[in-house]
Image (cartoon, helix red, strand yellow):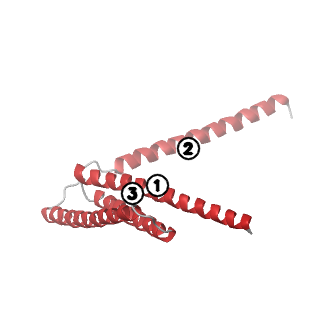
Amino acid sequence: MDPGDKVKEMTEIGSQKDDTIADDNKQDETSNVFSDLRRSTREVKYTDRMSEYRQEEFNKRKQKLMTIFDKWKDNVRKCRNLLKKECQESVLVDIIDSVKHLESSVVEHFEDLRTLGTITPEIARKVDACVAISADLLKTVNERLCEIVKSLICLVKRAALES
């Protein structure tokens, strides 16, 4: 085989690869065009009954969110009153569990409500406060737990040294 023939063969293979790549790019472009053409740009308009139903659902879920928020708020008050006194480790763990559970419930219901309609700034402010206050309270409780653990470690070391 002549070296010139090898060069021709290699250029033919290279051009075939280029054609294949170009065909793939064309297919991508045409699939993008078709997907864009199939997408509706028309604004969704609900019927009066559907709008009324969506508003009722929004109000129900908003009420549920406010009920859970009030439970969270009462729980935080109780927890703060408990933290004013000396607490056992089990009480602190219960506080952490209850605050985390109610906070996640508030956030979950808030996200659910957002799917149905526009959220008022008041509701968003309350949920933001819930998240921030919960984080602060959990930080305080965790610090207390660390203090208890440190004091227990000191007691164990002291007992080990005395024996």
Residue 43 visible in rendering? no
> Helix, strand or loop at disc 3?
helix
The kind of residue tagged 3 is Ser
Question: In terms of sequence position, does the residue under pointer 3 or pointer 2 come before the other?
Answer: 2
Tag 1 residue: 139
Q: Where is residue 104 in the image (x, y as percent from the top left)?
A: 39, 62
The reply to whether dot 1 and dot 2 touch (C-beta < 8 Å) is: no
Foreground of the two, 97 or 12: 97
Q: Where is residue 131 in the image (x, y as percent from the top left)?
A: 37, 54
Which label sits in the foreground, 1 or 3?
1
Which label sits in the foreground, 3 or 2?
3
Tag 2 residue: 24
The kind of residue tagged 1 is Lys
Q: Which residue is drawn at 39% across and 57% down?
A: 134
> Helix, strand or loop at disc 2?
helix
Query: Hey, which residue is sitting farthest left in the picture?
Result: 48
